[in-house]
Structure formats: structure tokens, C-alpha cells
Amino acid sequence: MLVHRSLLYLYFSTFTSAFTHTSQIVGSSVRAPSSFAMSSLSNDNHIGLTEIGSESHNASSDMSSNNELTSWRDKITSSIARSRKIRGGNYVQISTVDPATLEPRCRTVVFRGFLKENGSETNVMKMITDKRSCKYSEVTTANLGQGQKSNCELLWWFAKSSEQYRIRGQLKFVGSDEEDSFLSACRKEQWGNLSDLAREQFFWKDPGVPFEEQAKVPEGGRDSDGKVLPPPNNFLLMLLYPNRCDYLRLGDNYRQIDSIKDDTMWNIQRVNP
Ligand SMILES: Cc1cc2nc3c(=O)[nH]c(=O)nc-3n(C[C@H](O)[C@H](O)[C@H](O)COP(=O)(O)O)c2cc1C
């Protein structure tokens, strides 16, 4: 039976359920069966996207495991592993929309891993931010229109493997008022895992307003005994619940779009690059 180049499969539950029942966001991805193998993938020296900047990239050796329809989540796991040692390899860009002007806004943040529950990684992408930042107000004051699923797009370029992921989804901010005890614990854990320098920034004066000398802040976000202070109210764990991923690999001009069909099913489709 076949859905040509397209496959519905179940892996993680979604944003909606994850918001309210975090235990449901755990699951394991189901790899497309081999009958879906993408034998049409070619290693020919195609021109086009290949010329954009991947001259030294050898798709055939590097990407052999990708000659089948695997989920974006499987793909990104191996992209991350391959670029683990690259400085800045965990910097991503996230875009939101300013609801007042409908203009796009984009900035770099650090990807801090996938949310884990019961020891298993979910699809949910962890970042941190400050409640005083524009991204927070942009997302929290926006009204999602009917049928609109995303309020954020995350862009991740892997220079080593010449891969681009454009991940759409909904951002959730986990702050001091979080009612979900699991997410609240994750926020505290993330605070404890930050470097002293990163922690200290949350005690700085309001960002984005005319410059003033900083007042004295607790060094390293610690008290006088060196103990880490509790997270201030403006410290937010920022979670992206993906619902669509547009994947592009320059080496062999391969593009795939994964999108959530309902709350639990993902559709994977190879598309023209
Ligand atoms: C390499 C790099 C990493 C950054 N990491 C973060 C981060 O993890 N979280 C964050 O909120 N801002 C981070 N920033 C700062 C943001 O890019 C941005 O300037 C800030 O969040 C304010 O953005 P906003 O007011 O538009 O929300 C980083 C900037 C750079 C250059």
C-alpha cells in the first residue's frame, strides 16, 4: 500500500497535549519502513543548490543513512551529533512577528537540547530567554488566528553537513508562575545548569532601553557564600513545540517537509528542492 513519497507516522504527541499533559509528549520516533526507501536520491553532480556553498561536501559518503525517508527528528539528531564540536554549532535563529506592526523579528539564541521526560528526549526544543525581551511580548500579546498553528520559526544551519532546518511551532515560556510542576522543575534545573556568566545577565538592568551603568549584580548569580540564587522572575525557559519542519540538504539537493497532521501524526514528504 503506498503513499508515494509520503508517510504518516506516529512519533511524539504535540504541542496541544504537551501544554497540558506533559507526560504525553514522550514517545519514540518510528522510522519509515524500508519499502519507503528513497532510491531516487541521486549522487550525480547536479548543479543548482549544490553550488550554493557545499563544494567540499561529499553527499554520498556523509549522507548514506539518509537515503530513506526518515523523520526530521532523526535527521536533526545526527546533524547535531556531526556538528557537536563546532563552536557556535548550537546557535539557532528564531523569528517571531511583532503583532503591532506585523513585521518579522529575528534573533540568535542558544539551543539547549530537547526536553527530556522520564529519561527520553521529546521533540520539544529548549532555549532560555528574558521576560523583558521583545520575543516574549511579541508572542504573548499576539492572537493566533483561526487555524494558525505557529508563532515562531526556528532556523538552524549546519555548516559541516550543509543542511538547513526551518522548524515552525509554538513557543511556550515557562516562568516563575508556571503551574505545571514538571515544567517548573525543568526551568529550575536549566537555571542551575547555566554558566555563571549567563546566570548573571538575568540580574542586569532592563534590556533594550538607553544605556545606564549596571548597578552591582550578584556575581555569577550567586550569593555571598557562592550558592546559586533562585531564578529571578524574568528568567524563562523557552520551549518550542514543533509542528512543521522544512529540511534542505545542499549536498544532493534533497528537501523534505514534515508536518503534523493532527495532534499525533506527522506526515513526511520529499519535495522538490
Ligand atoms: C551567539 C548569541 C547567542 C544568544 N543567545 C541568546 C539566548 O540563548 N537567549 C536569548 O534570549 N538571547 C540570546 N541572544 C541575544 C538575542 O540574539 C537578542 O539580542 C535578545 O534575546 C533580545 O532579543 P528580542 O528583544 O528581540 O527578544 C544571543 C545572541 C547571540 C549573538
Image (cartoon, helix red, strand yellow):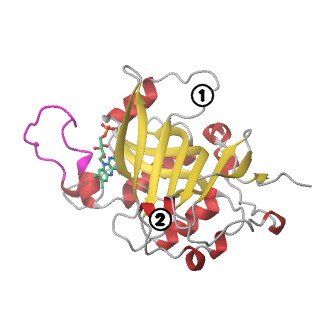
Please tell me whether residue 259 is drawn above or below residue 227 in the rendered image: above
Q: Is residue 165 magenta?
A: no
Indicate the position of residue 11 as horizontal and vertical percent values: 72, 54
Give how far across and how far down residue 174 sits, in percent. 47, 41
Mark 1 Cβ and ligand 1 under 8 Å apart? no
What is the secondary structure assignment of the residue under circle 2?
Answer: loop
Mark linked to residue 138? none
- Which numbered disc, 2 or 1, marks the residue that appears first in the sequence? 1
Q: Is residue 96 left or right of residue 216?
A: right
Q: Amino acid at mark 2?
A: Ser
**Residue 125 appears in view:** yes
Horizontal and vertical percent position of residue 77: 57, 65
Q: Main secondary structure of the magenta part?
A: loop
- The crowding category of the residue bearing disc 1, from other C-alpha atoms within 10 Å (few below 14, some 14 to 19, many at least 20), is few
Residue placed at 62% from the left, 58% from the top? 73
Rendered location of residue 205, percent (x, y): 18, 38
Which residue sits at x=65%, y=73%? 65
State the extent of the magenta-drawn residues as a range: 201-218
Q: Is residue 234 left or right of residue 75?
A: left
Q: Is mark 2 within 8 Å of ligand 1?
A: no
Q: Between label 2 and label 1, give the one nearer the viewer.
A: 2
SS for callout 1: loop
Check disc 2 and report the residue beneath it.
162
Instruction: Report the Cα–Cα distance between label 2 and label 1.
Output: 30 Å
Which residue occupies the foreground of this view, 220 or 125? 125
Q: Which residue is mark 1?
A: 148
- Residue at left 59%, top 77%? 60
Give 82 or 16, whichever is nearer the viewer.
82
